[in-house]
Amino acid sequence: MDLPEGLKTARERGLVGCTRCTRPSRIGTRICPRCGSPLRSRDPLSLQKVWAWWLVGLGCYIPANLYPMLETRTLVSSQSDTIVGGAIDLASHGNLGVAIIILIASVLIPVGKFVIVAGLAIGVRHGPQISDHRRHLLYEVVEYIGRWSMIDVFVVAILSSLVQLQALATITPGWASLFFALSVIFTMLSAQSFDSRLIWDSAPDAAHPAPEDHDPSKERTA
Amino acid sequence: MTDTTPLDDMIVCPTCDLVYSAPRVALREKAVCLRCGTVLVAPRRKAGKQLVALALTVLILIGAASVFPFLTIGAAGVRHEASILDTAFAFSGSLSILAVAVLFFIIIIPALRLILLIYVLTPIIRDRPPAPYAKSAFRLSEALIPWSMAEIFALGCAVALVKLSDLAEVLFGPAAWIFAILVVLVVASDRLMCRYSIWTSLKD
């Protein structure tokens, strides 16, 4: 790890950093004096919370794919589509581009999120297989992309509020929309529970000095 | 940096826990963590005033966007228009819990966040002491960021439009344009905001 000369983590210096306002406090301080957030050097329950939300999220993602997302009624037909079914339907009607976009947004990205969050959590626990910078990048991607999955639910809402053309065509949302929304919320909570400082602690060649190596009495409280 | 630096003059990277002595950062420059690249300090001139102005604008726009129709559909002589509120209430019956969630994600949480931000920043830009409970207010406003999804909704409009374009004639209403402006303003205010500067000015 190419850590710049002389830089140490807050834990190595007997401090705990506030993740909200960045102020360090002496280790053992419970509440950040600057912003009032609770302080934890590392969240000991981080991985458990990650896995709990992850499992609930996965549990919701399965019915999200089994139930219909949209029910379309037109003059001649009535049709309910699951996420994948709808994409296949679009593809067979020649709308390959839109079908691919739907598959990426509703299948590839959610599944990718599950895999990445699980991979990060396993890496912290059992020793990572890839460099900490790459893991940090994956973490940022998951944090950033997570909320954008909600777009599917919004599109369903927009379509069903707009396409209300009496007998001509109506679209109503199906059960999958609720499960999909829940799945997005739970995976967001799972990613938020992940303590990103664990990525850097578990770097293969990171030094792990015990906190008592350091004399905290040298630190002066402001 | 020595071990005798006062704690208030140090910065701990929130993402990777490295300790720095708080750098003097010139306006329009930014300090980033050397290890993980997280932006630590990024002060802007008059950022507070601009943020309050932007927040007020976005708040008014959200109010307007929720009542005007934002998309109109027409096919074979039948027309139908929908406002943001109609959109949320598209989920009815057993799905009505989702209506509440959508309403929160696209209207209530974004609006609440902006109100909190205005409440926190207004005393600061007027050089007054921080408002009561300003710290809690700013903490809540920060915690709400991931759940404020107005800009995601705006992109959802575009996707819905593409999906419907070969089935029916779809027209943008005034609210759609308002939402488009809103996305730009939300991104702009995110770039202006220096959390470190706000927190240090809230310290009593």
Image (tube, coloured by chain):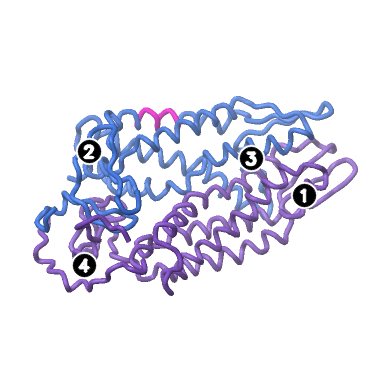
CA–CA distance in space, label 4 to label 3: 49 Å
A198 or A26: nearer the eye?
A198
- Residue A28: assigned label: 4
CA–CA distance in space, label 1 to label 4: 56 Å
Report the quarter where the N terminus of chain A lies. bottom left
Rate crowding at label 2 as few (under 14), some (14 to 19) or many (20 or more) other CA atoms within 10 Å: few
Amino acid type at image mark 4: Gly
Which residues fall within the magenta stretch? B52-59
Q: Which chain is blue?
A: B
- Residue B25: assigned label: 2
Provide residue A150's location: percent of width, then percent of height. Answer: 58, 49
Q: Same chain for the residues at labels 1 and 3, yes or no?
A: no
Is B57 within the magenta? yes
Q: Chain of mark 1?
A: A
A106 or A45: nearer the eye?
A106
**Figure quadrant of residue A39:** bottom left
